[in-house]
């Protein structure tokens, strides 16, 4: 599998597909019946998948922090759950006025 120049979602889909294949092939087998190579590959895939998810989260967080509309939506969700207070609430109100 080649992962270097693929978008993150494609990488995650491929990794997930291969992970599901490995888990399916291991169904009904005892741990000592599963070849070590398969165990290692599954562990490697889980690690790569976790890394890709972290990258994706970082990209989305960076984008959201620079986009006032997305930040406004996040703050609306926090406000609805009574979790927006203090300075964050003040920024939300100022941003709301600017958007209007």
Image (cartoon, rainbow, N blue to C red):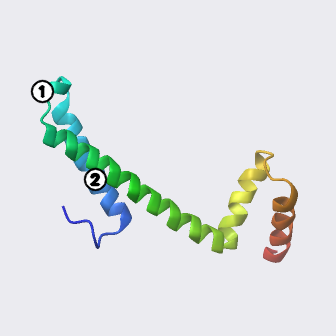
Query: Height in image: 14 above or below 36?
Result: below
Q: Which residue is mark 2?
A: 15
Q: Position of residue 79 (x, y in %)?
A: 79, 52
Dividing the picture into quarters, in which one does residue 7 lie? bottom left
| Residue plotted at (65% across, 69% down) | 65
Disc 2 to disc 1, C-alpha distance: 23 Å
| Residue plotted at (39% across, 59% down) | 52
Q: Nearer the viewer, mark 2 or mark 1?
A: 1
- Badge 2 or badge 1: first in the primary sequence: 2
Q: Quadrant of the N terminus?
A: bottom left
Q: Position of residue 24 (x, y in %)?
A: 20, 35
Instruction: Decide if residue 58 is on the left or right side of residue 10.
Output: right
| Residue plotted at (82% across, 76% down) | 98
Question: Which residue is more in the foreground, 18 or 77?
Answer: 18
Question: Which residue is more in the foreground, 18 or 50?
Answer: 50
Number of residues whose C-alpha sits closer than 10 Å to that of mark 1, classed few (under 14), some (14–19) or many (20 or more): few
Instruction: Decide if residue 7 is on the left or right side of residue 73.
Output: left
Q: Quadrant of the C terminus?
A: bottom right
Q: Are marks 2 and 1 in contact (CB under 8 Å)?
A: no
Q: Which residue is mark 1?
A: 33
Instruction: Decide if residue 9 is on the left or right side of residue 96.
Output: left
Q: Position of residue 25 (x, y in %)?
A: 16, 35
Query: Height in image: 43 above or below 98?
Result: above
Dividing the picture into quarters, in which one does residue 19 lie? top left
Dividing the picture into quarters, in which one does residue 95 lie? bottom right
Residue 13 image label = none
| Residue plotted at (74% across, 58% down) | 75
| Label 1 residue SS | helix
Q: Position of residue 27 (x, y in %)?
A: 20, 28
């Amino acid at each position: 599998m080649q992962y270097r120049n693929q978008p993150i979602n494609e990488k995650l889909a491929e990794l997930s597909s291969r992970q599901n294949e490995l888990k399916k092939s291991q169904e009904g087998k005892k741990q000592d019946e599963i070849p070590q190579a398969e165990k290692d590959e599954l562990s490697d895939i889980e690690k790569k998948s976790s890394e890709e998810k972290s990258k994706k989260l970082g990209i989305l967080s960076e984008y959201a922090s620079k986009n006032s509309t997305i930040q406004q939506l996040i703050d609306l969700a926090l406000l609805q759950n009574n979790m927006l207070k203090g300075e964050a609430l003040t920024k939300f109100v100022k941003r709301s006025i600017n958007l209007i």
